Image: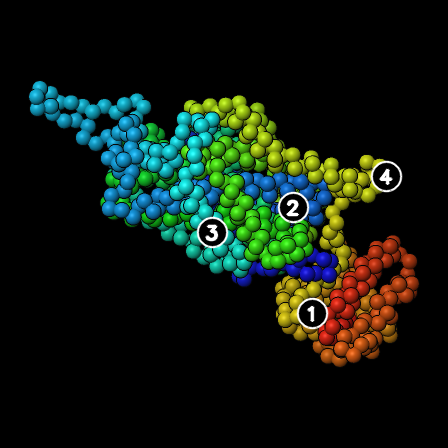
Amino acid sequence: MTLTGEVERENWSRKFEFILAAIGYSVGLGNIWRFPYLCFRSGGGAFLIPYFIMLVLCGVPLLFMELAVGQYTKQGPVGALNKICPLFKGAGLATVVISFLFTTYYNVIIAWAFYYLFSSFVSVLPWSDCSNTWNSDRCWDGRNKTYTDPATNFTVVDVKPNNSLSPTEDFFERRLLEKTSGIDEAGVLKWDMALILLMCWIIVYFCIWKGPKSTGKVVYFTALFPYLVLIILLVRGLTLPGAIDGIHYFLIPKWELLRDAKVWVNAAAQNFNSLGIAFGGVITLASYNKSHNKILKDTLTIAVVDAFTCILAGLAIFSILGYLAHNQGKAVDEVVSQGPGLVFVIYPEAFTSMPVSQLFSVLFFFMLICLGIDSEFASVEVIVTTIQDHFHMQVKKYLKRKEVLVIVVCLVSYLCGLPNVTQGGIYFFQLIDYYAAAMSLMYLAFFEVIAITWIYGAKRLARNVRDMTGVAPSMFFIACWYVVSPLLIFGIWMFSLIQYQPFQVDGYIYPTWATALGWLIAMMSILCIPACMIHTLWQAKGDSLWQKLKHSVKSPMPNPLENHIFSLHGEDAVMPDVMRLKNPDGRYDIEDTVFISDSKHAEPMHVDVETYRIKELLPGYDSKKDESARVNLLRYKENGYDKLFPAAARQSPRPRKAPQRPRPELRKFSDNGTMKISESYLSIDAYLDKLPRTDGANELAGYAQKLQQTCTMLIDMLLKRPGNRLHVNTERFKHPS
């Protein structure tokens, strides 16, 4: 717990674990079943042009923005947006709602993959022919198409009926789903799938129950194993007949389609869906980073790996589809599909005619499980982190441990996902998949960008990034945050509304009540923004609406040019490195810690606590003329401290070690060894009276008040924990005056 009352944030054990977790969250099933199809239908190789343009102008800048917001605020999406702009905290809440809806049906896909995985451990794949008990009369495997009738000596040709199903389609619809005729006929719960779904949730629970510590270990396998399988499938696919034709269909450019606005909209939507922008997961994962983590490097790594995965998956998928089309004597575009149909119908059908089909089937579906689990546990972490951030005391009081909270979230999501494993569950699945995010994602992204870049300020966010990493974002990112990204998002949002059509899948038109249910699902996230706006305005200070609005849009976080508040660690905590920069650019080595301030030449103050370590320091100085050893605060200057501290601008001195004995100002007040900071040390007003009355006097007084409150909280906390001994040692720097 910090002195400001916030929960102390745990961090990733290693930076590489965060990278893997972020890549695992971004690289999901959409890279396998959506991107290759979009590329094929939207111009082939020509689609890569709008895809990479949208990636550079929209995807990368917004990914950078969300990583920076999460890392700086140390909060989930709701807390982060509340710190950025309280009026728009509803955008953060909406992302949590979308993540919850996402978790309820996304795990169903993982359950399907497990069912196929278990079914692959047989001598003959069960979807290879029509001789099984579950096969319907419509099943047609296309084998032995011609035979000779001995009675008439005529050759009989077995022609595929118009309404027939392939063995893989029959397995998916009749064996796995037991699909009904429509959403009106829900049918009964499939207990085998319900148990597999429960197993999936148990796996997700143990992936995240310890937070980043457990998640960071899981992603070493779940994030890397899919690449091994994709490479194996690509190498195997290239050796099959017809593979080159499939890759040709995937990459051949159709330049005329670039004139279609829908192609550009699809390219932008693919970037949002693939990178996980506006879903809350990026902010949540970044909130567990250390403050000095290099954000730009992480952004480029995640974006490049995600784009590479899309292309690698497309090559692997279409090489197999080319082989399947060659075997069936069809054109590649006749066997191409997207969504669940690609991975649960088309691809398994290709495996049946390959040597060692069981091995490739096991590898493929295990890869799907890894891809799905990575995205799933990141979405669950969004919900858990949000509850933990805002209801920490209630969780601690009623649930005692975070692990119990994770159980509750997983159990509720499991129960809400059970309708998807009924006999008519596929219709609910498709309805939620379409309305949960597709209808509201751009709407949420637009308000999120406006809140962060226009109200909070892109330049202010850039200063936050500079404070954390020592390097400010380039003007390219600021321009994209201010102008390019908001315009693109708004244009895509308007285009999607204009092009809206009632939802239907494979010719099945959903009834009116189902469409209304879909819009109700969409409104669960859409209405979060206006509802939270009304609540924030109602709670805001002020007598008029204008005053309330001014308070509602003001960020409660200190300006980057202000002082940071102390953060308290546990008894055995080791003081971490706050920042590392090379001399003479502001690096100060104090004992075992390196400190850096907002400006190149700011002079740090070292506060050493024996049993508690304070990691965020207030830049300032302790005047040697001040016998009472009061803490003095200096006003930040955006242009640097070189004008205030000309001596510091010429050299980077190494301060002497702080004395190990308490100062005289610290007096013992009880027999248990607890030390209390004297009133003279806390009294800063007397020193402020000595300062000249300048324009910054009011600002200095505000800083002094913050420090007084912080010191008071520190004393209160020590008084509640007898037996602790406090040493406060300040490094002295002489004021130039």
Q: CA distance from mark 4 to mark 1?
A: 43 Å
- Label 2 vs label 3, nearer the camera: 3
Could you tell which of marks 2 and 3 lies nearer the N-terminus? 2
Point 75% across, 49% down: residue: 556
Determine the image quadrant of residue 333. Answer: top left
Query: In this image, 482 relative to 146: left or right?
Result: right
Q: Mark 2 — residue?
A: 78
For label 4, the crowd category at 10 Å Cα-Cα, with few meaning under 14, some 14 to 19 and many 20 or more, is few
Name the spot of residue 318 as percent of width and height, x first.
35, 38
Mark 3 or mark 4, which is nearer to you?
3
- Tags 3 and 1 in contact by the CB under 8 Å rule? no
Residue at image mark 3? 202
| Residues marked 4 and 1 touching at CB (< 8 Å) | no
Callout 2 secondary element:
helix
Is residue 655 among the parts visible in the rendering?
A: no
Q: Earlier in the sequence, mark 4 or mark 1?
A: 4
Q: Residue at x 67, y 37 (%)?
A: 529
- In this view of the protein, which residue sits in the foreground, 153 or 115? 115
Amino acid type at mark 3: Ile
Sequence-first disc among 3 and 1: 3
Query: Which residue in the protein does label 4 denote?
Result: 543
Circles 2 and 4 in contact, beta carbons < 8 Å: no
Number of other residues with Cα within 10 Å of mark 1, as a class: few under 14, some 14 to 19, many 20 or more = many
